Amino acid sequence: MLPTVNSENIGKFAYNTYDAIPLMSYNCVVHLMENNEVIWKLIKYPVPDAWKMPALTYDEKIALINTGLEDATKYRVFLDVGQPDVWTEEMCSIRISPYSVFPDNRSIGTVTMIFEVFSHYKINHLSNYTTRIDTIMAEFLKTFNGVDGIGGIGKLHFDSLSNKEMRVAVGGQLPYKGKWLLMSNKSG
């Protein structure tokens, strides 16, 4: 005798639930903590020689991540877009969050992450004749482009053949200039 089949469950797992989306920002920050020291130095130290400063400890990096409970101006790393508080300090911050989700079909979708950096105009130039913003953009690409295994994200890529959204663009508002980077992955 054949087992009975519950018709309500047929094809149930063929539909993408996108359940990894809430943790994508966090998982990117964890990957950044473990795989890039330059960005952490550039957001912690508002001095022209920030790139030469000692590497931050794990606890120092944790202390820079917004917990959502206090004044956001005390932090430099955010898991969403937007800035609700007025900044009066010359500083640099980054934001990493899901930007868009486009379903390719019922099982696979393209999830785009946004990586933003904002720096006060007065501290953007570094002593090595580069800028904080462009250095962080390059470090984002080096740290995330083509990397697989970031919890729940899959392989992030910066490739316009698979997604026309991919780009680096200028943003920010005086006295903070910024840039943002869009990178995608296939989720399924």
Image (cartoon, rainbow, N blue to C red):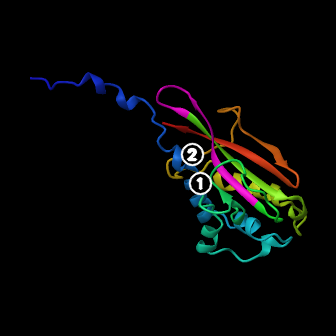
Instruction: Check disc 1 and give the amino acid type.
Output: Cys
Residue shown at 45% from the left, 33% from the top: 16
Q: Between residues 179 and 129, which one lies in front from this camera angle?
A: 179
| Extreme-bottom residue of the structure | 54
In which quadrant of the rendered view does residue 32 lie? bottom right
Q: Between residues 128 and 76, which one lies in front from this camera angle?
A: 76
Tell me the chief SS of the magenta region.
strand
Q: Nearer the viewer, mark 2 or mark 1?
A: 1
Which quadrant is home to the N terminus? top left
Q: Secondary structure at mark 1?
A: helix
State the CA–CA distance, disc 2 to disc 1.
12 Å
Residue 181 at x, y percent in the picture:
73, 46
Q: Going by the image, does 127 lie left or right of 75?
A: right
In which quadrant of the rendered view does residue 88 lie? bottom right
**98 drawn magenta:** yes
Residue underneath mark 1? 28
Q: Between residues 131 and 65, which one lies in front from this camera angle?
A: 65
Q: Secondary structure at mark 2?
A: loop
Which range of residues does the magenta coloring cover?
93-109
Residue underneath mark 2? 155
User: Which numbered circle lies on residue 73?
Assistant: none
Crowding at dot 2, Cα within 10 Å, few <14 / some 14-19 / many 20+, comes out as some
Residue 75 at x, y percent in the picture:
68, 64
- Upstream in sequence: badge 2 or badge 1: 1
